Image: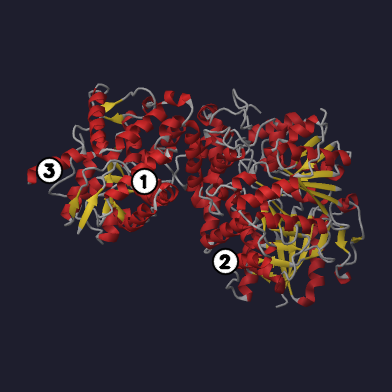
Amino acid sequence: MRASLFITCYNDTLFPETGRAVVKLLERLGVELDFHPKQTCCGQMHANTGFRAEAFSQAKRLVQMYQDTDTVVIPSSSCVAMFRDQYPGLLEELGNEELRKQFTALLPRVYELSEFLVDKLKVEDVGAYFPHKVTYHASCHGLRALHLGDRPWRLMNKVRGMEQVALPNLDRCCGFGGTFSVKNAEVSSAMLAVKLQDIVGTGAEYCTALDNSCLMHLGGAMHRQYAGMKTIHLAEILASTEASPMEVPA
Amino acid sequence: MNVHVQPRPRSRQMILERVRAATHSVTKGAGELEDAYAALPRGYVRSGGLSGEARIALMIERLREYGAEVIECGPEQVQAAIAAQLASSGKHTFVVPAGLSAAWLTPGFEWKIDRDLIASEIEQAEGVVTAAFCGVADSGTIVLHHSAAEARRVLTLLPDWHLCVLRARQVVETLPEYFARCEQAPGLATYISGPSATADIEMTRIKGVHGPRLLHVVMVRDE
Amino acid sequence: MSHGSYHPILDPTKAPAFPSAVLPVLRNPQLRKNVAHAIDVIQAKRGKLVAEKTDWQELRTAGAAIRAHALENLGFYLEQFEERCTAAGGVVHWAADAAEARQIIVKLLREENASEVIKIKTMTSAEIQLNPFLESAGVRTYETDLAEIILQLGEDEPSHIVVPALHVNRSQVREIFSRTMGLKDLSDDPKELTNAVRTYLRRKFLDIPTAISGANFLVAETGSVVVVESEGNGRMCLTLPRTMITLAGIEKVLPRFQDLEVMLQVLARSATGERMNPYTSVWTGVKPGDGPQKFHVVLLDNGRSSILAKKTERQTLRCIRCAACMNACPVYRQTGGHAYGSVYPGPIGAILTPQLMELHHARSLPYASSLCGACYEVCPVKINIPEVLLELRSRVVNQGRDQAGRLFDPMYLGLRIASLIFSRAWLFHTAQFFGRVGLRFLRRKDGWIHSLPSIGGKWTQTRDLRGLPSQTFHGWWAARKRETK
């Protein structure tokens, strides 16, 4: 199986270890991975802030870049949600007919990481080993835009050595919201405080998710508050094995 | 303050024009509109699947959840059931709509029959006895269409105690089944689902704000 | 009532922008506790009752379709409503804007020689700021909904469209009632407080012959009006007075009576977490011998027809004012309703208020959301609020594009530059390099950044940022590829 990795702009810059984990994981599962060197950003930040023309130019770039690709894997729910929920509207409003056709053909081949594993590779046990206590944060985009459902749990349940602790108020937003976190910093922080209380209350060592954006927000506050907990993308847990444990982030 | 009243008779035309321009509707033929309406998705549950017995049991359960007192009786015992409820109410003066069966007016109580009673007379009554149009089991709703036996709206509003006679064959399971029973839309209707209530103070549910605080139902098993 | 140091302003033309309007609330732990408690109670009840409804999604689909159909054919249904209501003895008035609606109502009250009026809770009357206008025209208004009385007597403002006083707790209610009703021995037991209101209002209901209501629905087929309520104050106002004036937005029309079989099933469950609200009243014009013998309906446009004209935004008008969106909203849960600077708070307010104001005001409201999507998920008529928020954000940005001040807005500049950077991989990679080098100076020994300049400082108010790793992912990939070759 061949797949092309769209790593996303912020993972590329801020969380390269997640990208390395995806590579380790998928290659271990026999996927032949490709990486388009000219990729940058899906345009979500622009679209969500109201800069629609700018978002459109990113969308156009990506659709054209990936039009001949078999399968695109993205380890970020919110960027996949951008593809599914916002590209159609953007292309209808600003796009040409040819671009729309290219997009329509591409869309069913775009997968979020857990979708790719469970739906496309049809695997739940990826051979992972992670001897830690972990709580899972369901990001809003994964939960309500992509409807990931039980996919993350089907994967996590097969991780050896891992103890899961359920997070209360699972469907409540952590308060990140992209530029919302600075445009409405005070409200965002208030939401964060409530979420952090729930997360720290689980007593887990790690909080994991399928979006590093939420984790950056949560992890930043954990670090500020000496919460004694860390954040980790689920890809890094799934990549970790007994023989080759997770790399410790810099 | 001096209020200048400037009637703008053209507002009607202006609003309608703006609405039509906004929806790009050229005067659609009634037929076309009818078709579009008929094509609306209605995949929800229209009629329920409960047996007759279960349907009545659900209605009674819902009414009791609301704090209503329910007693059941056969078609022959309606009078006796009403009399028993009246006797245990501790009340003496009742208003009734003019269309209510005269046989239900148990002797020994003061009955005010509503022939254009004024509000203050109705308010002085301690209770009211009426029939109903329908009951909806799913939500424990009593439907009044305010026919001659169901009383004018004010009668079931001012007295603190309401005794409603509901027949089993009037009880449907789902709300859509009630609407299906309306051969013609009622001009007036009141749907009562439990006594009046509020949760405006700290979401604490308090019963009996303005309407009758006590609801009694005589369920006539006529099926 | 003032909450600590501020009095809420619910006029979008005067209210402060959302980010600053939230500050007094966020510093008021009692208020936040009251809001969160109320929201959690409603949410739990709603969740339970929605879960037992096996056809909930089908009801939402039908609800959305019925409302959308009514709006697509609004001209037809409005005229049909007018014709049938008139035939039944009602008088229909049309108001293009708030000022005209207020004038029509005052004129009708003058004809009745009314110096007092009883009111059923209506958000539309709050929208047109009817009460202060009537008071200044010499008409005393008596709100009859318990929450509205708390607010009216406490000189406070609504913070929720279904439970408008949810930000006030029982001891605050006790204080207001005992002060304004002169009840010295009142306790803070909600039952006793409610009884005080029953007594306070009973005479008003019997004595004041003129009432004003809103409408939950207008039925085109029959010309009927529907009011959904819990307390019975609505039934009192609809039954006892001589004259009834109903104020309704033009979007409230349903095609047929039978459509209520969907709307009533979703409304109470969404609004209060009940299978059905205690009282629903349907009436049609005037019925001799039963209820008000004079009946007026004022149909209000006030910006609605311009919302109707916009493709994405039109769905806003499907709203049936159940407030499920604000109950589900994690932002509202923190801020309560006053910060939205409008009688319509929460997610629906964030899209409705700027549109009713045609975006001249309330430009910060479309940004008052983390776009988590909880509002859309619970909406019983499937209004895609995040989609409308994004549409409005794009309008706000486009309006700002030709304003000189944009060049001093770090957010605008930052996003314009980012857009350029993302347009070429080499520019992106160069920017990553300079970012890494630049941020190195801000990094502490632990490798984290504790303080950022400019808008970044908004981030580091409450969160640290891990320093940028020395190698990007694409850099690692390229190096690995070179090695394996």
Dot 3: within a 10 Å radius of its alpha carbon, few (fewer than 14), some, or many (20 or more) residues?
A: few
Residue C164 in the figure: left or right of residue C364 = right
Q: CA distance from mark 3 to mark 2?
A: 58 Å
Q: Please, is residue A151 above or below residue C316 in the view?
A: below
Query: Any mark on residue A78, and which?
Result: 1
Closest to the observer, C110 or C359: C359
* Residue type at numbered disc 1: Ser
Query: Mark 3 and mark 1, same subunit?
Result: no
**Which element is circle 2 on?**
loop
* Residue type at numbered disc 3: Arg
Residue C49 in the figure: left or right of residue A38 = right
Residue at point 76% right, 55% down?
A: C82
Identify the image quadrant of residue A123: bottom left
Dot 2: within a 10 Å radius of its alpha carbon, few (fewer than 14), some, or many (20 or more) residues?
A: some
**Which residue is identified by label 3?**
C480
Query: Any mark on residue C19, and which?
Result: none
**Which residue is identified by label 2?**
B42
Write down the chain letter for disc 1.
Answer: A
Q: Please, is residue B143 above or below residue C297 in the view?
A: below
**Which element is circle 1 on?**
helix
Write down the chain letter for disc 3.
Answer: C
x, y percentage for residue C222? Answer: 75, 61
Identify the image quadrant of residue B61: bottom right
Write down the chain letter for disc 2.
Answer: B
Q: CA distance from mark 1 to mark 2?
A: 33 Å
Closest to the observer, C455 or A203: C455
Identify the image quadrant of residue C74: bottom right
